[in-house]
Amino acid sequence: MGTTAAIAHRPATPVRHDIPSLDGLRALAIVIVVLSHTRAVLPAGVAQSGLFRYTVGGGLHGVQVFFVISGYIITTLLLREFDRTGEISLPRFYARRVLRIFPAFYLYMLVLGLLWVTGFQRQDPSSFLSAATYTILYHPHPIGWTIEHTWSLSIEEQFYLLWPAILLLAHRRRIATGAALACLAAMPVLRIFIAGFSAQALETHNRLIVSSSAIDTLMAGCLLALLAQTHGWRRWAERWITAWPVAALVGIGMLVVPYATTKAGAGPLAMPCVVLGFSVTGMSIAAALEYVVRRPDSPFGRILNAGPVRHLGIISYSVYLWQQLFTGFPRLGLLMYPLILIAAELSFWLIEKPIMRLRARLA
Protein backbone atom coordinates (compact mmCIF):
# COMPACT_ATOMS: atom_id res chain seq x y z
CA MET A 1 0.00 0.00 0.00
CA GLY A 2 1.71 3.22 -0.97
CA THR A 3 1.46 6.88 -1.68
CA THR A 4 2.31 8.42 -5.01
CA ALA A 5 5.78 9.68 -5.76
CA ALA A 6 4.63 13.29 -5.64
CA ILE A 7 5.07 13.35 -1.86
CA ALA A 8 8.66 12.34 -2.37
CA HIS A 9 10.05 15.56 -3.71
CA ARG A 10 11.56 15.81 -0.24
CA PRO A 11 15.22 14.79 -0.31
CA ALA A 12 15.85 11.38 1.19
CA THR A 13 16.82 11.59 4.83
CA PRO A 14 18.79 9.07 6.86
CA VAL A 15 16.86 6.91 9.28
CA ARG A 16 16.89 8.28 12.82
CA HIS A 17 15.26 6.76 15.85
CA ASP A 18 14.81 10.05 17.64
CA ILE A 19 14.51 13.75 16.93
CA PRO A 20 16.58 16.20 18.99
CA SER A 21 14.77 18.07 21.77
CA LEU A 22 11.42 16.28 21.46
CA ASP A 23 11.92 14.19 24.60
CA GLY A 24 12.81 17.37 26.46
CA LEU A 25 9.64 19.05 25.23
CA ARG A 26 7.66 16.03 26.40
CA ALA A 27 9.28 16.44 29.81
CA LEU A 28 8.21 20.08 29.91
CA ALA A 29 4.67 19.10 28.91
CA ILE A 30 4.31 16.44 31.59
CA VAL A 31 5.68 18.79 34.27
CA ILE A 32 2.96 21.29 33.36
CA VAL A 33 0.28 18.59 33.58
CA VAL A 34 1.49 17.19 36.92
CA LEU A 35 1.90 20.64 38.48
CA SER A 36 -1.62 21.55 37.42
CA HIS A 37 -2.98 18.43 39.12
CA THR A 38 -0.98 18.87 42.32
CA ARG A 39 -1.55 22.54 42.99
CA ALA A 40 -3.18 21.61 46.33
CA VAL A 41 0.18 20.51 47.74
CA LEU A 42 2.16 23.44 46.37
CA PRO A 43 2.88 26.59 48.40
CA ALA A 44 -0.03 29.00 48.16
CA GLY A 45 2.25 31.75 46.88
CA VAL A 46 3.10 29.53 43.90
CA ALA A 47 -0.28 27.96 43.16
CA GLN A 48 -2.15 31.26 43.44
CA SER A 49 0.33 33.37 41.50
CA GLY A 50 -0.72 34.80 38.16
CA LEU A 51 2.23 33.18 36.39
CA PHE A 52 1.15 29.74 37.61
CA ARG A 53 -2.54 30.27 36.88
CA TYR A 54 -1.99 31.48 33.33
CA THR A 55 0.88 29.25 32.19
CA VAL A 56 0.10 26.04 34.09
CA GLY A 57 -3.58 26.48 34.87
CA GLY A 58 -5.52 23.28 34.35
CA GLY A 59 -2.68 21.63 32.44
CA LEU A 60 -4.08 22.34 28.98
CA HIS A 61 -0.82 23.91 27.81
CA GLY A 62 1.00 20.68 28.63
CA VAL A 63 -1.50 18.67 26.61
CA GLN A 64 -1.21 21.15 23.74
CA VAL A 65 2.57 20.64 23.68
CA PHE A 66 1.97 16.88 23.49
CA PHE A 67 -0.44 17.38 20.59
CA VAL A 68 1.96 19.54 18.59
CA ILE A 69 4.70 16.94 19.13
CA SER A 70 2.35 14.14 18.05
CA GLY A 71 1.38 15.91 14.85
CA TYR A 72 5.00 16.68 14.06
CA ILE A 73 6.55 13.32 14.80
CA ILE A 74 3.81 11.18 13.25
CA THR A 75 3.93 13.18 10.02
CA THR A 76 7.74 13.19 10.02
CA LEU A 77 7.96 9.43 10.52
CA LEU A 78 5.37 8.72 7.83
CA LEU A 79 7.24 10.91 5.34
CA ARG A 80 10.52 9.25 6.26
CA GLU A 81 8.92 5.85 5.69
CA PHE A 82 7.96 6.95 2.21
CA ASP A 83 11.47 8.26 1.53
CA ARG A 84 12.92 4.97 2.66
CA THR A 85 10.50 2.46 1.15
CA GLY A 86 8.47 4.34 -1.48
CA GLU A 87 5.22 3.64 0.37
CA ILE A 88 3.27 4.21 3.58
CA SER A 89 1.95 1.02 5.13
CA LEU A 90 -1.16 1.76 7.16
CA PRO A 91 -1.30 -1.74 8.73
CA ARG A 92 2.28 -1.39 9.90
CA PHE A 93 1.62 2.10 11.23
CA TYR A 94 -1.45 0.99 13.17
CA ALA A 95 0.42 -2.01 14.55
CA ARG A 96 3.21 0.26 15.82
CA ARG A 97 0.69 2.61 17.43
CA VAL A 98 -1.15 -0.26 19.11
CA LEU A 99 2.10 -1.57 20.55
CA ARG A 100 3.10 1.90 21.70
CA ILE A 101 -0.18 2.94 23.31
CA PHE A 102 -2.24 -0.07 24.34
CA PRO A 103 -0.04 -2.14 26.71
CA ALA A 104 0.68 0.59 29.28
CA PHE A 105 -2.82 2.04 28.95
CA TYR A 106 -4.63 -1.24 29.53
CA LEU A 107 -2.36 -2.06 32.45
CA TYR A 108 -3.52 1.21 33.98
CA MET A 109 -7.16 0.41 33.23
CA LEU A 110 -6.71 -3.09 34.68
CA VAL A 111 -5.43 -1.62 37.94
CA LEU A 112 -8.40 0.77 38.05
CA GLY A 113 -10.73 -2.16 37.41
CA LEU A 114 -9.20 -4.16 40.26
CA LEU A 115 -9.52 -1.20 42.63
CA TRP A 116 -13.15 -0.90 41.53
CA VAL A 117 -14.18 -4.52 42.03
CA THR A 118 -12.38 -4.73 45.37
CA GLY A 119 -14.22 -1.67 46.66
CA PHE A 120 -11.25 0.67 47.00
CA GLN A 121 -12.52 3.02 44.33
CA ARG A 122 -15.78 3.69 42.56
CA GLN A 123 -16.23 4.04 38.82
CA ASP A 124 -19.13 5.06 36.65
CA PRO A 125 -19.65 2.06 34.32
CA SER A 126 -20.44 4.02 31.15
CA SER A 127 -17.58 6.47 31.72
CA PHE A 128 -15.16 3.65 32.43
CA LEU A 129 -16.22 1.80 29.28
CA SER A 130 -15.85 4.92 27.14
CA ALA A 131 -12.38 5.51 28.59
CA ALA A 132 -11.37 1.91 27.92
CA THR A 133 -12.49 2.17 24.29
CA TYR A 134 -10.96 5.62 23.63
CA THR A 135 -14.41 7.10 23.08
CA ILE A 136 -14.68 9.26 26.21
CA LEU A 137 -14.46 12.27 23.93
CA TYR A 138 -18.02 11.45 22.83
CA HIS A 139 -19.38 10.74 26.31
CA PRO A 140 -21.79 13.59 27.19
CA HIS A 141 -21.00 13.64 30.93
CA PRO A 142 -17.99 11.51 31.90
CA ILE A 143 -17.53 10.92 35.62
CA GLY A 144 -14.38 9.95 37.50
CA TRP A 145 -11.09 11.70 38.16
CA THR A 146 -8.94 8.64 37.48
CA ILE A 147 -10.21 8.40 33.89
CA GLU A 148 -10.73 12.07 33.17
CA HIS A 149 -7.34 12.47 31.48
CA THR A 150 -8.18 9.86 28.84
CA TRP A 151 -9.95 12.57 26.82
CA SER A 152 -6.60 13.54 25.32
CA LEU A 153 -5.78 9.91 24.53
CA SER A 154 -9.17 9.63 22.83
CA ILE A 155 -8.31 12.60 20.61
CA GLU A 156 -4.89 11.13 19.83
CA GLU A 157 -6.47 7.85 18.75
CA GLN A 158 -8.85 9.62 16.36
CA PHE A 159 -5.84 11.45 14.93
CA TYR A 160 -3.91 8.20 14.47
CA LEU A 161 -6.86 6.71 12.63
CA LEU A 162 -7.46 9.64 10.28
CA TRP A 163 -4.28 11.55 9.52
CA PRO A 164 -2.14 8.71 8.02
CA ALA A 165 -5.05 7.81 5.76
CA ILE A 166 -5.36 11.47 4.70
CA LEU A 167 -1.64 11.55 3.90
CA LEU A 168 -2.01 8.35 1.93
CA LEU A 169 -5.01 9.60 -0.05
CA ALA A 170 -3.69 13.13 -0.57
CA HIS A 171 -1.27 11.84 -3.23
CA ARG A 172 0.64 15.10 -3.32
CA ARG A 173 2.57 16.93 -0.66
CA ARG A 174 0.86 20.18 -1.57
CA ILE A 175 -2.56 18.62 -1.03
CA ALA A 176 -1.53 17.27 2.38
CA THR A 177 -0.19 20.72 3.30
CA GLY A 178 -3.43 22.25 2.08
CA ALA A 179 -5.44 19.83 4.22
CA ALA A 180 -3.47 20.85 7.32
CA LEU A 181 -3.92 24.54 6.50
CA ALA A 182 -7.64 24.02 5.89
CA CYS A 183 -8.02 22.41 9.32
CA LEU A 184 -6.16 25.27 10.95
CA ALA A 185 -8.39 27.78 9.19
CA ALA A 186 -11.59 25.88 9.94
CA MET A 187 -11.16 25.59 13.72
CA PRO A 188 -11.62 29.32 14.51
CA VAL A 189 -14.75 29.29 12.36
CA LEU A 190 -16.00 26.23 14.23
CA ARG A 191 -15.37 27.96 17.55
CA ILE A 192 -17.40 30.96 16.40
CA PHE A 193 -20.24 28.56 15.72
CA ILE A 194 -19.86 26.82 19.10
CA ALA A 195 -19.48 30.02 21.12
CA GLY A 196 -22.48 31.48 19.33
CA PHE A 197 -24.87 29.20 21.18
CA SER A 198 -26.68 30.41 24.26
CA ALA A 199 -25.11 30.00 27.68
CA GLN A 200 -27.12 26.82 28.23
CA ALA A 201 -25.08 23.62 28.37
CA LEU A 202 -21.96 25.76 28.75
CA GLU A 203 -19.92 22.81 30.00
CA THR A 204 -20.65 20.89 26.80
CA HIS A 205 -19.74 23.92 24.70
CA ASN A 206 -16.47 24.36 26.57
CA ARG A 207 -15.60 20.72 25.96
CA LEU A 208 -16.27 21.20 22.25
CA ILE A 209 -14.11 24.33 22.17
CA VAL A 210 -11.22 22.61 23.96
CA SER A 211 -11.58 19.58 21.67
CA SER A 212 -11.40 21.83 18.62
CA SER A 213 -8.20 23.31 20.04
CA ALA A 214 -6.66 19.84 19.85
CA ILE A 215 -7.13 19.90 16.08
CA ASP A 216 -5.35 23.26 15.91
CA THR A 217 -2.37 21.98 17.84
CA LEU A 218 -2.16 18.61 16.10
CA MET A 219 -2.35 20.27 12.68
CA ALA A 220 0.26 22.85 13.68
CA GLY A 221 2.68 19.99 14.23
CA CYS A 222 1.64 18.24 11.02
CA LEU A 223 2.06 21.42 8.99
CA LEU A 224 5.49 22.03 10.47
CA ALA A 225 6.61 18.52 9.53
CA LEU A 226 5.31 18.95 5.97
CA LEU A 227 7.18 22.23 5.58
CA ALA A 228 10.33 21.28 7.46
CA GLN A 229 12.33 19.87 4.54
CA THR A 230 11.36 22.41 1.90
CA HIS A 231 14.11 24.83 0.90
CA GLY A 232 11.86 27.87 1.17
CA TRP A 233 10.82 27.02 4.73
CA ARG A 234 14.39 26.30 5.81
CA ARG A 235 15.57 29.69 4.53
CA TRP A 236 12.63 31.47 6.17
CA ALA A 237 13.03 29.60 9.48
CA GLU A 238 16.76 30.29 9.66
CA ARG A 239 16.06 33.98 9.29
CA TRP A 240 12.96 34.47 11.41
CA ILE A 241 12.53 31.56 13.84
CA THR A 242 15.35 32.54 16.15
CA ALA A 243 15.68 32.77 19.91
CA TRP A 244 14.07 36.12 20.66
CA PRO A 245 11.13 35.89 18.24
CA VAL A 246 10.38 32.39 19.55
CA ALA A 247 10.57 33.56 23.16
CA ALA A 248 8.14 36.38 22.32
CA LEU A 249 5.75 34.00 20.54
CA VAL A 250 5.78 31.54 23.44
CA GLY A 251 5.13 34.39 25.87
CA ILE A 252 2.16 35.50 23.78
CA GLY A 253 0.75 32.02 23.27
CA MET A 254 1.20 30.65 26.78
CA LEU A 255 0.87 33.74 28.96
CA VAL A 256 -0.74 36.67 27.14
CA VAL A 257 -3.49 34.59 25.48
CA PRO A 258 -4.73 32.89 28.70
CA TYR A 259 -4.40 36.18 30.60
CA ALA A 260 -6.44 38.05 27.99
CA THR A 261 -9.01 35.25 27.81
CA THR A 262 -9.48 35.31 31.58
CA LYS A 263 -9.69 39.09 31.80
CA ALA A 264 -12.05 39.34 28.83
CA GLY A 265 -14.75 37.43 30.71
CA ALA A 266 -18.00 37.95 28.86
CA GLY A 267 -16.92 41.27 27.36
CA PRO A 268 -16.41 42.22 23.72
CA LEU A 269 -12.92 40.66 23.63
CA ALA A 270 -14.18 37.27 24.79
CA MET A 271 -15.09 36.02 21.31
CA PRO A 272 -11.73 36.89 19.66
CA CYS A 273 -9.86 35.29 22.56
CA VAL A 274 -11.86 32.07 22.37
CA VAL A 275 -11.84 31.95 18.58
CA LEU A 276 -8.18 32.79 17.91
CA GLY A 277 -6.42 32.14 21.21
CA PHE A 278 -5.99 28.38 20.76
CA SER A 279 -4.68 28.89 17.24
CA VAL A 280 -2.09 31.41 18.42
CA THR A 281 -0.97 29.10 21.22
CA GLY A 282 -0.65 26.13 18.87
CA MET A 283 1.44 28.09 16.39
CA SER A 284 3.67 29.47 19.17
CA ILE A 285 4.37 25.93 20.40
CA ALA A 286 5.12 24.84 16.82
CA ALA A 287 7.58 27.74 16.45
CA ALA A 288 9.35 26.70 19.65
CA LEU A 289 9.48 23.09 18.44
CA GLU A 290 10.99 24.16 15.11
CA TYR A 291 13.65 26.19 16.88
CA VAL A 292 14.78 23.60 19.44
CA VAL A 293 14.77 20.75 16.90
CA ARG A 294 16.89 22.81 14.52
CA ARG A 295 19.05 24.29 17.29
CA PRO A 296 19.62 21.60 19.95
CA ASP A 297 22.90 23.39 20.71
CA SER A 298 21.08 26.53 21.89
CA PRO A 299 20.95 27.17 25.67
CA PHE A 300 17.34 25.96 25.92
CA GLY A 301 18.07 23.10 23.53
CA ARG A 302 20.91 21.91 25.75
CA ILE A 303 18.55 21.87 28.74
CA LEU A 304 15.96 19.89 26.81
CA ASN A 305 18.56 17.36 25.66
CA ALA A 306 20.15 16.85 29.09
CA GLY A 307 20.02 13.22 30.19
CA PRO A 308 17.61 13.48 33.16
CA VAL A 309 15.27 15.78 31.22
CA ARG A 310 15.23 13.44 28.23
CA HIS A 311 14.53 10.46 30.49
CA LEU A 312 11.52 12.20 32.00
CA GLY A 313 10.31 12.83 28.46
CA ILE A 314 10.85 9.20 27.51
CA ILE A 315 8.68 7.99 30.40
CA SER A 316 6.20 10.88 30.03
CA TYR A 317 3.44 8.64 28.64
CA SER A 318 3.56 6.43 31.72
CA VAL A 319 3.77 9.49 33.95
CA TYR A 320 0.69 10.91 32.22
CA LEU A 321 -1.24 7.70 32.79
CA TRP A 322 -0.35 7.08 36.42
CA GLN A 323 -0.30 10.63 37.79
CA GLN A 324 -4.09 10.68 37.61
CA LEU A 325 -4.33 7.85 40.12
CA PHE A 326 -2.19 9.57 42.74
CA THR A 327 -3.18 13.18 42.22
CA GLY A 328 -6.72 12.24 43.23
CA PHE A 329 -5.44 11.91 46.82
CA PRO A 330 -4.19 15.34 47.97
CA ARG A 331 -3.65 13.97 51.48
CA LEU A 332 -0.59 12.18 50.11
CA GLY A 333 1.08 15.58 49.98
CA LEU A 334 4.51 15.72 48.39
CA LEU A 335 4.63 11.91 48.52
CA MET A 336 2.59 12.07 45.30
CA TYR A 337 5.65 12.94 43.25
CA PRO A 338 7.86 9.93 44.10
CA LEU A 339 4.84 7.61 43.87
CA ILE A 340 4.05 8.90 40.36
CA LEU A 341 7.66 8.45 39.27
CA ILE A 342 7.92 4.95 40.76
CA ALA A 343 4.71 3.83 39.04
CA ALA A 344 5.84 5.38 35.75
CA GLU A 345 9.30 3.79 35.92
CA LEU A 346 7.81 0.37 36.65
CA SER A 347 5.36 0.75 33.77
CA PHE A 348 8.14 1.86 31.44
CA TRP A 349 10.68 -0.83 32.28
CA LEU A 350 8.26 -3.74 32.70
CA ILE A 351 5.77 -2.93 29.93
CA GLU A 352 6.92 -0.25 27.50
CA LYS A 353 10.58 -1.18 27.19
CA PRO A 354 10.03 -4.86 26.27
CA ILE A 355 7.32 -3.86 23.78
CA MET A 356 9.77 -1.44 22.13
CA ARG A 357 11.82 -4.39 20.89
CA LEU A 358 8.79 -5.77 19.09
CA ARG A 359 7.99 -2.32 17.68
CA ALA A 360 11.54 -2.05 16.39
CA ARG A 361 10.96 -5.09 14.18
CA LEU A 362 8.01 -3.29 12.58
CA ALA A 363 10.12 -0.18 11.92
Image (cartoon, rainbow, N blue to C red):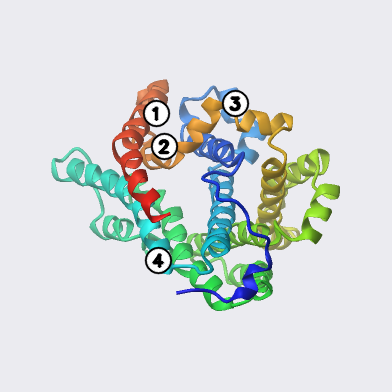
The residue at which mark 1 appears reads as: 341
Distance from disc 3 to disc 4, alpha carbons, whole Å, reads 35 Å
Q: Secondary structure at mark 3?
A: helix
Q: Residue at x 30, y 40 (%)?
A: 351
Looking at the rendered structure, the secondary structure element under dot 2 is helix
Marks 1/2: CA distance? 7 Å
345 relative position to 39: left or right: left
Residue beneath disc 3: 46
Label 3 – label 1 distance at C-alpha: 22 Å
Q: Residue at x 29, y 44 (%)?
A: 108
Judge by depth and name the residue closer to the eye, 131 or 198.
Answer: 131
Q: Does residue 283 sit above or below 188 in this rendering?
A: above
- What amino acid type is highlighted by mark number 2? Val
Name the foreground residue: 208 vs 219: 219
Instruction: Tell me the distance, in whole angstroms, between the alpha carbons under discs 3 and 2.
Output: 22 Å
The first of marks 1 and 2 along the sequence is 2
> Looking at the image, is mark 2 or mark 4 earlier in the sequence?
4
Residue 179 visible within the image: no
Residue 107, x across and y down, in percent: 26, 44
Q: Secondary structure at mark 1?
A: helix
